[in-house]
Amino acid sequence: MDVTLRDGLQDEPVVVPAEQKLDIARGLLRSGVAGIEATAFVSPAWVPQLADAETVMAGLGRLAEEHQAVFVTALVPNRRGYERAKAAGCRVITVVMSATEAHNRSNLNMSRRESLQHVREIVDDAHHSGIRVRGSLSTAFGCPFEGPADVGSVIRAVDDYVATGIDELSLADTVGLGTPDVVRAIVAEIAPLELAVWLHFHDRLHQALDNVRVGLNLGVFRFEAALAGLGGCPFAPDAPGNVNAVALAQFLRSEGVDCAVDVAALEHLEDEIAHVLTHAPSAPDRRGAPSSTAR
């Protein structure tokens, strides 16, 4: 799944216009990606880069009708974000919370217990409305505030999350602290789960692809990436970018995985987005308290 339009752009110092985001989305759809994370329904005052969430979802929804094998999702941090996503016609949403208390409060401005209650309420309403719910767990492999991941604590966080009824689980290495040993210890524990598992790596230590290999060896074949390795978390100090989408596609093929993505198309999109970022207007300063964003 490609996360450029949300995770990739949310921490950039510029605001990319909605129509240019949709141009990138068209290219992603043509490239054969399995899914697109289009935006996040968060406070425009706090994340101005994503203030056009409704516009982007409306446009991308029309485009996705021509590519029905591709799912489109949007991140929602709380009930208010969910109501906006639902009103915008989202059929797949991604809820988010953290494995650690400190990052959860920094990223979502609430405790983990409060987040779980929000997720339960969202999942219940979403399922009654025919909406699929992906659950992203931030700081699953390490936290900028609490340090290296405690495997037992992460597994308990996963168990609590799964108990809310989410349909899919994404484990996110928000600040790129995950090492192959840590990834192996955690992913091996969750392997028996009877729901789809995704891995979302940021590439601080140049170990993201090594971590992907660990996931493959443990039976995980769903990964999230961004064009040009863009991305980061506004509420996690010094968060690095995502694993590069082109590098991931090439790596998966080298590992013998049947990856249908058109690498040349992704490379062209990298050039396109570099041009877009060079010419986009500057983002205004953030205001107010966090209402989520990054994984």
Image: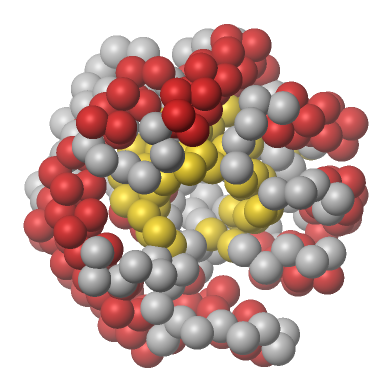
- Measuring 36% from the left and 55% from the top, which residue is drawn there? 72
14 relative position to 94: left or right: left
Question: Do we see residue 204 in this rendering?
Answer: no
Rendering coords of residue 94 (x, y %): 47, 40
When asked about the image quadrant of residue 2, the answer is bottom left
Question: Do we see residue 255 in this rendering?
Answer: yes
Rendering coords of residue 227 (x, y %): 39, 67
146 relative position to 122: left or right: right
Q: In this picture, is 45 found above or below 48?
A: above
In the image, 257 versus 167, the foreground residue is 167
When asked about the image quadrant of residue 69, the answer is bottom left
13 relative position to 278: left or right: right
- Measuring 62% from the left and 63% from the top, which residue is drawn there? 222
Rendering coords of residue 85 (x, y %): 30, 33
**How are the colours assigned in the image?**
secondary structure
- Measuring 76% from the left and 49% from the top, which residue is drawn there? 194
217 relative position to 291: left or right: right
Q: In this picture, is 31 found above or below 196?
A: below
In the image, 249 versus 87, the foreground residue is 87
Rendering coords of residue 193 (x, y %): 79, 47
Q: In this picture, is 282 found above or below 95?
A: below
When asked about the image quadrant of residue 198, the answer is bottom right
Q: In this picture, is 99 found above or below 52?
A: above
- Measuring 64% from the left and 44% from the top, which residue is drawn there? 169
